Image (tube, grey):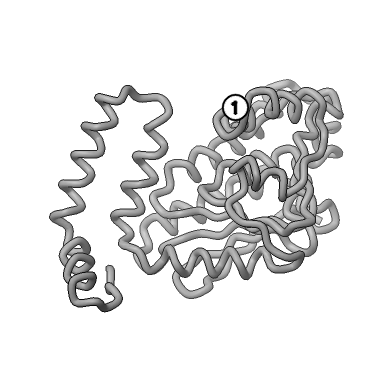
């Protein structure tokens, strides 16, 4: 069965479903390309205000397809390099995407699947989900930005243990470390992620886009540069129609209606 990425709308949220249940939704080049295309479409669609990424069935994603990786050993290294570039293009597209992206995780979240979840802005996970940087267990090193994400989201010792030992870590522990946004009951991850998305959809899209851009720039920029960027975004957003609506609605004690 070919790995595919399914898409449907839930109100103002685009839901992208990794679909390769025979292999626990293992990833492949077809999914990477479809993921980039879907986000490019959503970027220009004002009716879509958020994206949720989930897996079909009882698992989020087992990572890369090991049969495909074994087959790629028979080809020139450029073949695998091109495949990884496809994954990395999707990861960078998620990061640069101006709207919130939420991962809804059930069951296994391994390897590149873990990297994919980490690339999202928020993670909602079932309390029985298991996360693992499985690469070293099969003689490989991480991809999908896992080293970048883990070293910025948790203590070095914990991140190194996950990557060097390939040990499993459960959702409650990751939540305690601040990596996972919300833990929920088994089977509820998608519904809880959609509820979270609905709350975000009610916010001013331009303000959320600014927050995401500023947050992406913060770890690498100087304080002076960040202060300048915050000033520019604030002034631009103040003069956006949504700020007029938001401030007026707050003073009038009514819900704001952003566009």
Q: Residue at x 13, y 55 (%)?
A: 239
Q: Is residue 121 above or below residue 137?
A: below
Left or right: where 131 falls relative to 206: right
Left or right: where 233 falls relative to 139: left
Task: Give residue 99's quadrant in the image.
Answer: bottom left
| Residue ID for mark 1 | 151
54 or 175: nearer the viewer: 175
Q: Residue at x 75, y 26 (%)?
A: 161
Q: Is residue 41 above or below residue 250?
A: above
Q: Residue at x 64, y 58 (%)?
A: 104
Classify mark 1: residues with Cα within 10 Å, few (<14), some (14-19) or many (20+).
Answer: some
Residue furthest to the left: 239
Left or right: where 246 falls relative to 85: left
Question: Residue 59, how many percent across, how many down?
Answer: 78, 56
Q: Secondary structure at mark 1?
A: helix
Q: Is residue 20 visible?
A: no
Q: Quadrant of the N terminus?
A: bottom right
Task: Give residue 82's quadrant in the image.
Answer: top right
């Amino acid at each position: 069965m070919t790995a595919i990425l399914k898409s449907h709308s839930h109100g103002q949220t685009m839901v992208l479903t990794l679909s390769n249940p025979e292999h626990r939704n293992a990833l492949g080049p077809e999914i990477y390309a479809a993921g980039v295309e879907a986000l490019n479409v959503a970027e220009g669609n004002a009716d879509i205000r958020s994206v949720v990424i989930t897996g079909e069935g009882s698992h989020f994603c087992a990572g890369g397809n090991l049969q495909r990786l074994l087959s790629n050993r028979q080809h020139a290294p450029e073949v695998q390099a091109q495949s990884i570039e496809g994954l990395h293009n999707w990861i960078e597209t998620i990061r640069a995407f101006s709207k919130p992206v939420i991962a809804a995780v059930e069951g296994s979240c391994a390897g590149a699947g873990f990297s994919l979840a980490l690339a999202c802005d928020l993670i909602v996970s079932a309390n029985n989900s298991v996360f693992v940087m499985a690469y070293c267990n099969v003689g490989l090193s991480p991809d999908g930005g896992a080293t970048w994400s883990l070293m910025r989201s948790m203590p070095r010792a914990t991140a190194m243990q996950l990557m060097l030992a390939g040990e499993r870590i459960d959702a409650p522990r990751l939540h305690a470390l601040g990596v996972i946004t919300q833990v929920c009951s088994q089977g509820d991850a998608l519904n809880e992620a959609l509820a979270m998305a609905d709350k975000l959809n009610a916010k001013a899209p331009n303000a959320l886009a600014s927050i995401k851009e500023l947050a992406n720039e913060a770890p690498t920029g100087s304080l002076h540069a960040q202060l300048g960027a915050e000033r520019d975004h604030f002034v631009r957003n103040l003069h956006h129609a949504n700020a007029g609506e938001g401030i007026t609605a707050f003073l009038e004690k009514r819900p704001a209606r952003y566009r």
